[in-house]
Image (cartoon, grey):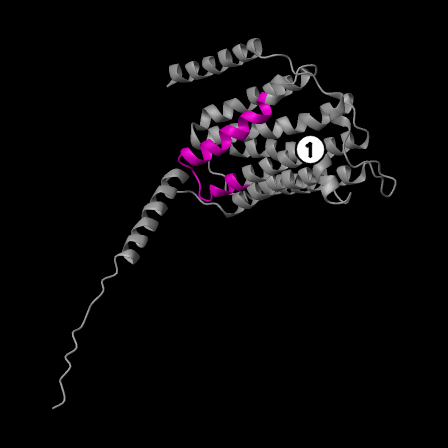
Amino acid sequence: MRKRTLWAWGTAIVCFVVLMIVTPVIPQDEAYHDFADHRDFFGIPNALNVISNFPFLVVGIAGLILCHYKNYFRFSLPGELWGWTVFYIGVAAVGIGSSYYHLHPDDARLVWDRLPMTIAFTSIIAIFIIERVDVWKGTLSIAPLLLAGVLSILFFDDLRPYAIIQFVPCIAIPLMAILLPPMYTHSSYWLWAAAFYLLAKIEEAEDKQIYNLTHNIVSGHTLKHLCAAMVPVFLTIMLAKREIDEERVSLLVIWKISWYRFKEERNKQDGIDCTYTSVSVEEES
C-alpha cells in the first residue's frame, strides 16, 4: 500500500512537471477585471458584485459553528473535523476576500479573491480522500494540499498552477462521488454541488451577455457568486442529513440497480396477458 501511494504521488508530480513543460504560459488577462456591472449603490462601488459575496460569509460562519457545536455533523473519522473546518474557513474567507477584490478590481486584490477559493478546493480533495480512500492519508494530505494551493497563487504571472488547483477538483470530485463507495449516505448532494459550480462557471464566462439579456438588471458574475454559494449550502445540508452507510454502495451501483428495476417494471407492463372469451350466439328459430 505504501509503495502504491508513492507511485501515485510520483505519477502526479511527473504529470504536473510535464504539463508545465509542454503547455504555454497563461498570463493574467488585464481585461478580466472589466466586469459588466459597474453600478454603485449606497456608496458601494460595483455593489452587486460585492454584496453577492455575503452568502459565502454567512454559510462559512454557520458551517464553522455547526462543525464544533456538540458534534452536530456527527463526524466519525479522524481528520474529518479538521478538513471541514478548513473548508468552512475558506468559504467564509471567500466572502471577505472576493468582496474586497470587487470593491476595486485589480491584480493586487485578485490574490485575496483566489486564495480563499484554493483553500476550499484543496480541503475538499482532502475530505474525499479521508472518506473514500484512506483516513490517515487524507488527514496527512490536508497540509500539503493547502500548501500547493497557496503556491499556485504565487505564480501570478502564470495561471497554469491555479487552473490545475481549480479544475482538477471539478473533475475528480464528481467522479469520486459516483465511483467510490461512500462512508455516509446522501452522496448525491456532492453532484448537486458540482452542478451549481459548473453553472457558476458558465455564468462567469457569460458575464456581459447575461447582463445584456437581463436588460442591465443583473450580470453573469453576480449570478456566479450566488450559484457558487449554493455549493457550501448543499454540502452543509448533506452533512446535517447524512448517516453512516453500512452497505457502502457507490452511486454508480445504485444507478445500475435502479435502471435494472426500471427495465423489469417496463417488461412487466409490456407483457400483460390478454384473455379472450368465446361468445356463442344461438340462432332464433
Q: Residue furthest left?
A: 285
Q: Residue furthest right?
A: 43
Q: Which quarter of the picture shows residue 56?
A: top right
Q: Residue at x 43, y 14 (%)?
A: 6
Q: Amino acid at mark 1?
A: Val
**Magenta stretch, residue numbers:** 164-192
Q: Residue at x 13, y 84 (%)?
A: 282
Q: Quadrant of the N terminus?
A: top left
Residue under numbered circle 1: 94
Would you say 182 lies left or right of 167 here? left
Residue 19 in view, yes or no: yes
The kind of secondary structure the magenta stretch mainly shows is helix
Could you say which is closer to the camera, residue 122 or residue 88? 122
Would you say 75 lies left or right of 252 here? right
Q: Position of residue 108 (x, y in %)?
A: 77, 21
Q: Which quarter of the picture shows residue 154?
A: top right
- Above or below residue 42? Residue 152 is above
- Above or below residue 159? Residue 80 is below
Q: Position of residue 235 (x, y in %)?
A: 56, 41
Q: Residue at x 60, y 43 (%)?
A: 233
